[in-house]
Image (cartoon, helix red, strand yellow):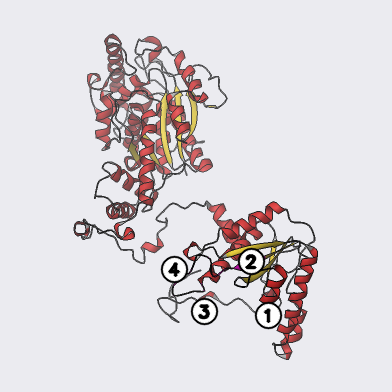
Amino acid sequence: MTAVDGPLQLPDPRPVDPKAYARAQDRLNQLTKPVGSLGLLEPILCDLAAIQGRAIPSVRRPRFLLFAADHGVASNRSISRYGQHVTEEMVVNIAMGTSVSSVMARNMGVALDVYDVGVLRKPRHPRVHVEKVGLGTADFTYGPAMTKEQCGQALANGMKAALRAVEEHGMDLLILGEMGIGNTTAASALAAWLLDLGAQEVVGPGTGIADEAVASKRDAVERACALWQSASQAYEPDSDAYWLAGMAQLGGFELAAMAGAILQASASGVAVLLDGLLAGVCALWATRMRPQTSAYLIAGHRSPEPAHGRILSALGKTPLLDMGLRVGEGTGAMMAWPLIKAGCEIMAETATFADARVSNPFAADLSSDEGHLALNDTDTRREMPPVAVDFDDAERKAVYKAIAARRDVRVFLPDPVPVTVVRRILEAGHQGPSVGYMQPWNFIAIRDKQLLAELAELVERERVRAGEKFPDEQRDYYLRLKVEGLREAPWTICVTNDPTRGGPVVLGRNTIPETDLMSTACAIENMWLAARAEGIGMGWVSMYEKEDLRTLLGIPEHIDPVALLSLGYTPHFADEPILQRVGWRNRIDIDDIVFFNGWAKPWKGDIR
């Protein structure tokens, strides 16, 4: 874990998984499309797979972090078409949702967090996170833009913002944006230093300034880089202190914050979708600090700024878009985001040639060792599943808790169960799986007291008859057990099974006709788990003559009444099944019932 509240500790990126990259490439090759036909998107999807450690990557919670600050160089030089007051005004515009970037984020379903890390004025909007390092940087043509302490705090602010997005919101893709009048001048100076280029090669028109302003901007970059050239002699080249001092000398509060966010995202195993020059130069600086960060970077677009293409080349990244965009604010990254989303959906939902039973004309080309990757025993024990898991830890634990805590309840309180709750339980049953999607079940919801009493009489008669079949030593014991609660429970659901539903031919049922009954049993289990999650007790009553039940409830002759399910609040859910608690029978050890690759062949591994 990165420490960002004490002395600054810059994190190391989490290692990526090359096996996941290979498996993702293999899947892309097997999809019903020409090999490599998704172009630039394919290596990016494989990079995502390696980052996430799964063969099929998924991005469900992208988050857009935008950092804003002012620059001292803009207060003394004509390097922009806009005055410094525009920074605060645009931050408010972004927070209101009426800027290009925030309109895109809202319409693309991406959450946006705006951070003021150094705007001269306090933004007049409550949704802006105000975490100022200072009121704009100093003019870097006269000295360092920031003190080393300020640079460290700006980095820490960006790291904390990214860490918050991961821990509180489950961010799985970081999209970066910025706002700050004069920041392309600072970014150009950083690019000149990091790429060892002259100002003439990196300075562009930014927001569309005239030639005279470009010359002033170029002069500012030359002066700032000359000062850093002299100051840098005090540092060991390529040391952390050297890179930090360079950022402090030439950068800006929002640039350092973006660099910190990139470092933290890579340490948290989260990919970063880059925008243009500003995000690109921050990413380049981050890779100089921590080279492995490069594996987490995705180039959203190419900016017309001359330095950006050189930055992308240094990073070894090919941009998804090259549209001449120069809006800034993260808009290029936002335009690229739907391509990433579409790529993940293609990976997950497109059929393979084998799945679609389509002849694969590329099979011969994929028959080498680099083609289809067979899973082995070690693959099945991967730390990460091959696909994204829809349930977080708490949700997953809740499912297993409902399964383990489900009980066949016989003791009920007379308190009414709301109809809305009963409806939810019935809907859970109706969502049960069924062979051929035949859905053979019906549910008769009963709460008429007279009818429930008549049902109880039918069950009691059969309970006594059933007791006669047990040996003498078990008969009395059995007859003392409470096996139903029809009289006490406020609701009883009669679940029926219709073997004719779906017609004479049902998909998947030609050799095992009783799959209709199996399907209905699945619906009942769904209801049982839903009831347990609702805090409702449910008891399955199966002692009755079907003809008696058909007559009492008016059920057609061809319909089987499968179960009577009593529903109601219960004073206590037992820690163990009732028949185990009373000593009737114990749960069989799982090792005695699980075989491996054939009947009675013991499982050699640990399945607990």
**Image point (38%, 44%), residue name:** 13
- In primary-sequence order, the first of circles 2 and 4 is 2
- Front-most of residues 346 and 180: 346
Q: CA distance from mark 3 to mark 4?
A: 30 Å
Compared with 162, 401 (above or below) is below
Q: Within the magenta stretch, is there residue 401? A: no
Q: CA distance from mark 3 to mark 1?
A: 19 Å
Q: Residue 561 location in percent, x, y? A: 64, 71
**Image point (57%, 77%), residue name:** 588
From the image, tell me which residue sits under label 2. Answer: 495
Q: Residue 474 location in percent, x, y? A: 72, 86
| Residue type, mark 1 in image | Trp
Dominant secondary structure of the magenta stretch?
loop
Q: Tell me which corner region of the image, top left, top right, bottom left or bottom right, holds residue 191.
A: top left
Depth-wise, is mark 3 or mark 2 nearer the camera?
2
| Residue type, mark 3 in image | Asp
Q: Secondary structure at mark 3?
A: helix
- In primary-sequence order, the first of circles 1 and 4 is 4
From the image, tell me which residue sits under label 1. Answer: 584
| Residue type, mark 4 in image | Gly
Q: CA distance from mark 1 to mark 2?
A: 27 Å
Q: Secondary structure at mark 2?
A: strand
Q: Are marks 3 and 4 in contact (CB under 8 Å)?
A: no
Depth-wise, is mark 3 or mark 4 nearer the camera?
4
Compared across the picture, whether 605 is left or right of 466 comes to: left
From the image, tell me which residue sits under label 3. Answer: 592
- Front-most of residues 290 and 586: 586
Q: Are marks 2 and 4 in contact (CB under 8 Å)?
A: no
Instruction: Tell me if I can see residue 265 in this picture.
Output: yes
* Magenta segment: 494-514
**Image point (80%, 61%), residue name:** 414
